[in-house]
Amino acid sequence: MAGLGASGAAVNIDVFDKARPHTGETVPEGDPRLWQSGAMARVYRRTARENGFSLPLPKSHYGFVPERLPVDGRPRVWQSQFRGGLTNFWGGTMMPLPDSDFARWPVSRADLDPYYAQIAALVGISGEADGLTPLLGTEPSNRPPLQLHPAIARLIAAINSGDKGLRAGVNRIALETRAHAPNACVWCGECLVGCFRGAPFTTASLFARWHAEGRVARLSDGEVTGIDLKARTLTVRDGEAEDTHGPYDRIFIAAGCLGSTRLLMDSMGLDAAEMADSRVVNTPIVDTSWRGVTPDRKGGFGLTHGLVLIPEADGSGIAAQTQLYPTLPHFWRSASPAALWGLAGLAGRPLAARLVWARSYLAARGANRYHLRRGADGTLSAHMEASDEGRALAAHANRALARALEGSAFQVLGFAASGGGSSSHYGAARPFRVGDGIVGVDFALAEGVYLADSAAWPDVPAMSPTFTIMANAMRIAQTAL
């Protein structure tokens, strides 16, 4: 939508974004630090009920979580049914792809740079120039940096103090940190249960604002169930009714990789497709020094604090993007009943002062692939093909972290690493991806119909994809007009 507006053309925009209604359960309001007794426990019970048991529980919106597509019979691939899609649940990291990741793209990093700048101005990115800036090619941040956890600040300094080939810095995140802004982050630390301030960027808030301003003519909760690529019409189900909308001059498909792939399979009569999922590994890192500050009982920031970029052994690109998290109350709340949270916190808070989690997103060659099939009844199923190179990449990432921290107080506990599962960074759907089927260099599926998300990418890189999805979508929209 921003790209269409920035094109300078007079446009009339309809947005179709399926929105699942909440169940009617009470959602706590206001600052979580001021919630009445029992409100947080209800949120965690709802999360566990919707998600099923896991440690830790996933990020939710006050206990509501996205649906997940089963893979080999187990729920795995997130597919949001809420307006704004997975931006309601994302971590907000906004990192541009390096030049090396564009090797198989029909456009270059230089082609996308103007659109990165436009998205940064639209969304707002918290961060600062630091050890990562030279690797990014340009500094995208335009908001004050987030408040780093003390152990993570020391960890970043330790990595940057040597010359081991790694660079670290504060997370670049789509977060409102300007103190005067009405939705500014207040550092309550409860990000994983939902932001009552609306500080992280979501497309839902953008849709609502632009609809109120008249920049969006129609904002529909209906579900698009089919696209006629030649006629440029949409079949939309709203409740029990199903209607045809259009024809439109332009249609931009941006339903997320899984949503777009499913929609195109149904519209084109395809029984099979594939998509990739960047693989992750989680590794604990311990600060063994005597110093340290125990985090406050309530406060801080509950998403990614720091980033480390780990190069390939031959220097050919980025092998892993490692996100640094503190140990949060969310961890022990997920593992124990509410009646024991106080006791768990007595042990958890001192540990949280020293235990950092490194979550490494691996390069494309380590990605898992999902083979999607549509059954006779229209339901979608998936089978996962695990990457043979994923374990080697994960081991390389942990060895690189350990080498960079040699001689410091930090110990990388590689033996305790876990993961190999979904990162929720999906892309590279066949047969839609560029250079491997029907999508051309302009990301057009047909005349006037464009695939504007990561389903058309040639692969899924280590770097967080959302900034590039947004920038490339803006490029597609502007050039389409």
Image (cartoon, rainbow, N blue to C red):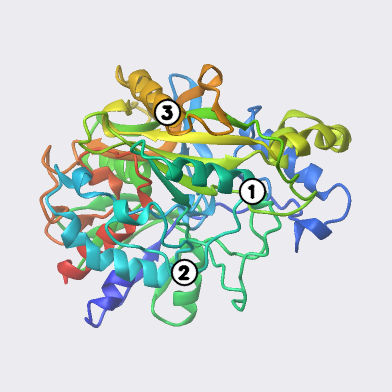
Q: Nearer the viewer, mark 1 or mark 3?
A: 3
Q: Amino acid at mark 1?
A: Pro
Q: Amino acid at mark 3?
A: Arg
Q: Residue at x 77, y 37 (%)?
A: 350
State the separation of the CA atoms marked 3 and 2.
43 Å
For the residue pair 242 and 331, the one nearer the viewer reads as 331
Q: Are marks 1 and 3 in contact (CB under 8 Å)?
A: no
> Foreground mark, 3 or 2?
3
Q: Earlier in the sequence, mark 1 or mark 3?
A: 1
Q: Nearer the viewer, mark 2 or mark 1?
A: 1
For the C terminus, the quadrant is: bottom left
Pinpoint residue 427: horizontal percent, then vertical percent: 30, 40
- Residue 206, image x and y in percent? 46, 69
- Which image quadrant for residue 329? top right
Residue ID for mark 2: 206
| Residue designated by label 3 | 403
**What residue is shown at x 20% (from left), y 49% (from top)?**
99
- Which residue is labeled 1 in the image? 150
Position in image of residue 187 (x %, y %): 67, 59
* Pointer 1 local density, CA inside 10 Å: few below 14, some 14–19, many at least 20: some
Q: Is residue 273 visible?
A: yes
Quarter occupied by residue 460: top left
230 sits to left or right of 151: left
Callout 2 amino acid: Leu
At horizontal 27% and vertical 32% (from top left) the residue drawn is: 312
Calculate the distance from the C-alpha at mark 1 to the C-alpha at mark 3.
22 Å
Earlier residue among tags 3 and 2 = 2
> Hey, which quadrant is residue 140 in on the image?
bottom left
SS for callout 1: helix
**Relative to residue 194, is residue 95 drawn left or right?**
left
Name the residue nearer the viewer: 137 or 254: 137
In this rendering, the answer to whether 96 lies above or below 311 is: below
